[in-house]
Image: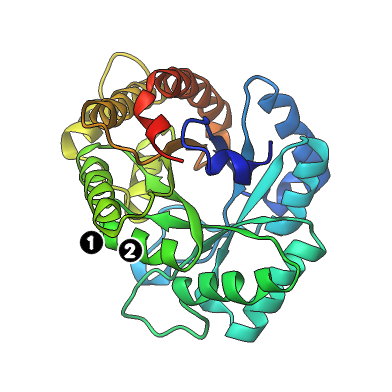
Amino acid sequence: MRIRDKIKKPRRPVVVYEILPPREEDGTLNSYAEIISSLLSQTHIDAINIPEVHDEIGRGERPVSNQKRGEPREFGMLLQDIVGIEAIVNRVAVHTPYNEQLRWIEETYRKYEIENLIIVGGESSRKKYPGPTVNETLSAITNILNQKHCNILCGGISIPSRINESKNLINKSSNGSEFFTTQVIYESDNIIKMITNYQKRCDDLKTFPRRLLLSFAPVSSQRNIDFLKWLGVEIPDDTERYLNGRPGSMKERSLDVAIEVFNEILNHINKNNLRVPVGLNVEHIMSYNFQSSVEMLQELAKIYREFCIKSSHYSLQK
């Protein structure tokens, strides 16, 4: 079953692993893909999620240097061939003019044989960009490209702490987004509030909620924490103190936090009979956290699959 079909079936588990394209200094895309294939044989995933990296100059000085990386589409095509699973490529829409953007997207589908895209916006809604907005891009894919023999599955990004984020999800869905990946989560309050509000808006509009992939990532140093916060991730002060505590390593403690937060979210969904279908997206943030992220993926996937088996309220939704 393809990832597009799994995403649209609420009771079907969807587990995704997010990884950056390799740095050019790490060698060829092909050799890196073989290493990933070997490591990912440790667990089951449904797709590989590949971000597109851009400098975020509006956020101030970057805590970690931004190194030149391989082309996401070439990396995705290789992973589909070598690992044998589908790739999801992220595309930051706002940096490329409208017509050129559509050509890039159509080329991704036809030349690179990648059918799954996550459309990403700019770092600030107040900044003027040369390219289209997320909703303009989603609409163009749905009403132009997918009407001329393309069959692209579109997703979007969700930032739980953003005001009226549930309304943003509705707007993106109406323009063609079939799923969302959240920002990395280190606390449950914002995401629980957003999911609850999203369900209410969907009920009011008599529409079905789209799949929400909950994102987690391990950290192993204060530098990792600073980088996540620079990206806009909400990490409460008490959580940061816990991560820096003893005994145990920060990697182990970040896994403990992820398990606790994930369980809080799933328990809230079950307790309140919410029908927002969720999935799991685990990322490594830094290449040296790769093995820790695989271990996190394994642990969270066990919890998630058990949740899917027991969640009978999803059966009420087509």
Query: Which quadrant: the N terminus?
Result: top right
Which residue matches tag 2? 168
Type of the residue with mark 2: Asn
Residue at 78% over, 51% down: 77
Give the Cα separation between the discs numbered 1 and 2. Answer: 7 Å
Element on which disc 1 rests: loop
Q: Is residue 274 visible?
A: yes
Give residue 110's position: percent from left, percent from top: 80, 64
Q: Residues within 10 Å of mark 1 (few under 14, many from 20)?
A: few
Give residue 158's position: percent from left, percent from top: 38, 54
Relative side of 254 to 110, left or right: left
Q: Residues within 10 Å of mark 2 (few under 14, many from 20)?
A: some
Rendering quarter of residue 106: bottom right
Examine the rendered structure and indicate whether residue 115 appears above or below residue 275: below
Kindly indicate whether the residue at mark 2 contacts the one at mark 1 (C-beta within 8 angstroms).
yes
Examine the rendered structure and indicate whether residue 54 appears above or below residue 187: below
Element on which disc 2 rests: helix
Relative side of 43 to 268, left or right: right
Give residue 276's position: percent from left, percent from top: 35, 41
Type of the residue with mark 1: Asn
Between 139 and 75, the one lying in front of the other is: 139
Marking on residue 73: none
Examine the rendered structure and indicate whether residue 256 appears above or below residue 228: above
Relative side of 16 to 195, left or right: right
Rendering quarter of residue 310: top left
Which residue matches tag 1? 164
